[in-house]
Image (cartoon, rainbow, N blue to C red):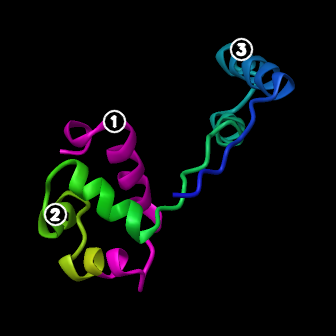
Amino acid sequence: MTVKTKETSRILDAVHETARDLHAAGFVSKRRMKEYDALCLVPVPDYSSETIRALRERYKISQAVLASILNTSLSTVRQWEIGEKHPSGPSLKLLNLLDRKGLEAVI
């Protein structure tokens, strides 16, 4: 797993806090506030085939169960674990959630 760290900037934190206050006061639109929120999100890390396999083994679940949890096919999970494909989009976010919060968070 390669972790993309995003250092928190005091300036960015201050801008975000100000934008929240302005949004609460009605001076910043909901659309603009979502843009400020997106700037402060920590990026989701990439998961290698070894990491996915280790994650699955940590929770003692089969490839079929992981596929069911992630709402994907068994062949996709197999391809991830042998390195032919890499997870992306919602699957990547769910893997990250499983990794950070545990099995109970995604079931």
Residue drawn at point x = 76 percent, y = 23 percent: 13
Q: CA distance from mark 1 to mark 2?
A: 18 Å
Specify the quadrant of the image occupied by residue 79.
Answer: bottom left
Residue 103: x and y, percent? Answer: 22, 42
Determine if residue 91 is in view: no
| Residue 19 versus residue 53 in the image, above or below | above
Residue 88: x and y, percent? Answer: 47, 68
Specify the quadrant of the image occupied by residue 17.
Answer: top right
Q: Are marks 3 and 1 in contact (CB under 8 Å)?
A: no
Q: Earlier in the sequence, mark 3 or mark 1?
A: 3
Choose mark 1 or mark 2, whichever is in front.
Answer: 1
User: 87 or 20, which is in the foreground?
Assistant: 87
Tell me the number on the disc at residue 21: 3
Q: Would you name the residue on which mark 1 appears?
A: 101
Choose mark 3 or mark 1, whichever is in front.
Answer: 1
| Number of on-image labels | 3
Tell me the number on the disc at residue 68: 2
Residue 40: x and y, percent? Answer: 68, 36
Q: Are marks 1 and 2 in contact (CB under 8 Å)?
A: no
Is the magenta region chiefly helix, strand or loop?
A: helix
Assign a secondary structure to mark 1: helix
Specify the quadrant of the image occupied by residue 6.
Answer: top right
Q: Residue furthest bottom?
A: 84
Amino acid bearing label 2:
Ser
Q: CA distance from mark 3 to mark 1?
A: 30 Å
Instruction: Give the extent of the magenta segment.
Output: 79-107
Amino acid bearing label 3:
Asp
**Could you classify mark 1 by the number of other residues whose Cα lies within 10 Å: few (under 14), some (14-19), or many (20 or more)?**
few
